[in-house]
Image (cartoon, rainbow, N blue to C red):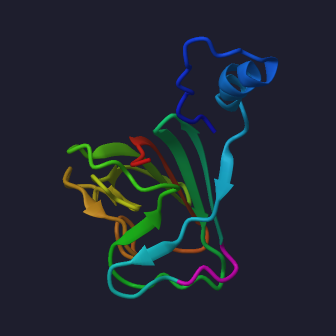
Amino acid sequence: MTFAPRTWVVGEVVTAALLNQEIRDQFNSMFAAWTSYTPTWTAATTNPVLNNGTLVGRYMKIGRTIQYHINLIPGSTTTFGSGGYSFDLPATAANAGASYVGNSHLLAGGTRYGGQNVVSPSATTTSPFFPPNSTTSTLSQLSPTVPINPLASTHQLRITGVYEAAA
């Protein structure tokens, strides 16, 4: 991962090791594989239990910019809890006075739902939002009954976005 560049001192001897660390290694980190992590899935009222489902996250951090992807595939023994869902981010968001909006997709059988996810200032989680039905354009937080009632083990949730990390 990239890090703060070195402050050079007048008269300092530049070595191959320093050049490799300060230039080559940082440049290579921008083209490295994404880092895997396991986000926590929570709900406002009762937390879901993944059981035999799959929840994976991946991210790439360049400087303080984080690109992330979260993929949830509930299993046959997954319980969905109650209330609006949130998913852990790979790092705390900066308190930059702005919210970041990413894309969310719910694949439910033959139906595809397009929505958004929001990363608020200083947030450690993101929450996906979808239109609650086909007749409204307002968004509601993803829950066991929104946008489809009920969510099931045959569905898949994909969340992607970019935000500024606090550190």
Q: Does the magenta stretch include residue 52?
A: yes
Q: Does the magenta stretch include residue 73?
A: no
Q: Is the magenta stretch mostly helix, strand or loop?
A: loop
Which residue lies most toward the right here? 16
Vertical position of residue 105 compared to residue 22: above or below: below
Residue 155: % across, % down: 56, 65
Q: Residue at x 53, y 56 (%)?
A: 90
Residue range (magenta): 49-53
For the question of whether residue 152 can be seen, the reply is: yes
Is 53 left or right of 65, judged from the image as shown?
A: right
Which residue lies most toward the front here? 11
Is 36 left or right of 115, judged from the image as shown?
A: right
Q: Residue at x 32, y 44 (%)?
A: 100
For the question of whether residue 150 can be seen, the reply is: no
Is 45 left or right of 66, judged from the image as shown?
A: left
Q: Residue at x 20, y 45 (%)?
A: 97
Residue 113: % across, % down: 42, 52
Residue 55: % across, % down: 62, 66
Q: Is the N terminus in the top left, top right, bottom left or bottom right quadrant?
A: top right
Vertical position of residue 124 compared to residue 102: above or below: below
